[in-house]
Amino acid sequence: RLKYRFLDLRRAPLQQALMTRSKVNQIVRNYLTDNGFIEFETPILTKATPEGARDYLVPSRVHPGQFYALPQSPQLFKQLFMVAGYDRYFQICRCFRDEDLRADRQPEFTQIDIEMSFIVPEDVFGIIEGLLKGVFEQVRGVQIPTPFLRMSYAEAMGRYGSDKPDLRFGLELQDVSDLVASSGFSVFAETVAGGGQVKAVVLPGGGLSRGRIDKLTQVVKTYGAKGLAYATADAEGAWTSPIAKFFSAEDQAALSQRLGMAAGDQALFVADKPGVVAAALGALRQTLAREQGLIDPNALAFCWVTEFPSFEWDEKEQRWFAMHHPFTSPRPEDVPLMDTDPGQVKARAYDVVLNGYELGGGSIRIHDAKVQQKMFDLLGMSAEESRQKFGFLLDALAFGTPPHGGIALGMDRLIMLLIGGDNIRDVIAFPKTTSASCMMTEAPSPVSKQQLDEVHITLKGE
């Protein structure tokens, strides 16, 4: 199909998807223009930056040995519009990231890019909720209740095991660490004693066979868990389980009560470090929901996830990385923690989530040159390196910058969810494969030696 995409595009589903895309473009432009936004364009040939995904590089013919990068986003340019006094910017723009692909990711993609001055996060929430409400009403004829649910990153990870939770079904993660800390089951007790946790999801009605549980065990092991314990409750809360012998009747009843288990319900437990527990049970939750038919395909469950950590520690490189990007503002009260305890710094960042997909992400930006330099320092950039890479931004911030922030929505993913799809290739006219190639045009392809000479490139081995 991708080899002869021009024929594939004759099919009714693809035609409908592309017509929907055109309509959404019009709705977005009309809505944002009506709300005082100005549409600007930003450069495609820009400067390579070290943070985030790999850049696509473009060699310069007139500057031998130097390269442009295709933009991963217009992030810095839209901030510079705020410095220049344009307080409401938007753009429907192309972005490029050289990263591993999957069903909802392409090397080049389109985003609805927005930035505003003199705002707080609630201002962004209001604009985006109004935009999405209009899109879904005009395209699908459905009313979306607003405001969207808000939850912190910690709550999302704790209850759903994901920072992009699918709220169309239950199966929430429940913490039983305190109830099993002194149990006779050493796997649970030793995990809690070592600073880990024990959590469970409960499948109403149970019915999982031993063979099925073995397969689910492989699911959680993919995410680092060592195994999957399970128990089925009776009407009194007593368990049928390989681990039942390690718990008294009172302990079994207390655990069943904590988990809200009725007769026949099955609890599935993971004991490990908090990050492993969240990832493993979050994936298990999704797997069970799909297999048990718990997801309403017509439901639309929006939410905002807020209060992300500003930084995450990379054990391999032994340094801090920005969880979003290095221009995201920490909470003002957390700025002193950047010097003493970076892991406790919360970002003024937010994601809008729909049915388990991150639809968009944004933040309030750093508007103080000193805080921005402190951010670069914390991320391991020397003053010379940060000046060389981001000197233009530091200079701009020093000239007086209004508080500002924004968001970017993934257009391709939005269209995919609007039409009920599960692969963004189905909403892009000429997409790439999962190996980032175009089967129709056969790009990427070799170029002539003359073309390489013009841009001063010699291939290895030649």
Image: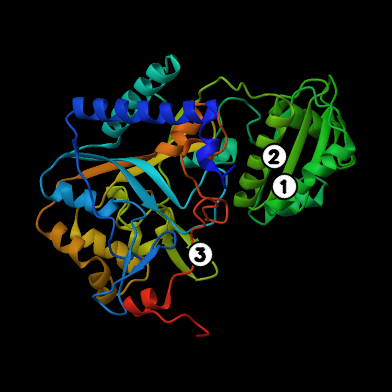
Label 3 vs 1, first from the N-terminus: 1
Report the Cα–Cα distance between label 3 and label 1.
22 Å
Label 1 vs 2, first from the N-terminus: 1
Residue designated by label 3:
314
- Cβ–Cβ under 8 Å for marks 2 and 3: no
Is 85 placed left or right of 16 in the picture? left
The reply to whether residue 348 is in sight is no
Give the percent coordinates (x, y) of residue 400: 10, 53
Element assignment for label 3: strand
Element assignment for label 1: helix
Which amino acid type is shown beneath numbered disc 2? Answer: Leu
Is 99 placed left or right of 27 in the picture? right
At 20% from the left edge and 67% from the top edge, which residue is drawn?
391
Label 2 vs 3, first from the N-terminus: 2
Give the percent coordinates (x, y) of residue 340: 37, 63
Element assignment for label 2: helix
Report the Cα–Cα distance between label 1 and label 2.
7 Å
Report the Cα–Cα distance between label 2 and label 3.
26 Å
Residue designated by label 2:
284
Which amino acid type is shown beneath numbered disc 1? Answer: Val
Residue designated by label 1:
220
Relative to 298, is 114 above or below?
A: below
Mark 1 surroundings: few (<14), some (14-19) or many (≥20) residues within 10 A: many
At 72% from the left edge and 33% from the top edge, which residue is drawn?
288
- Cβ–Cβ under 8 Å for marks 1 and 2: yes
- Cβ–Cβ under 8 Å for marks 3 and 1: no
Is 264 placed left or right of 353 in the picture? right
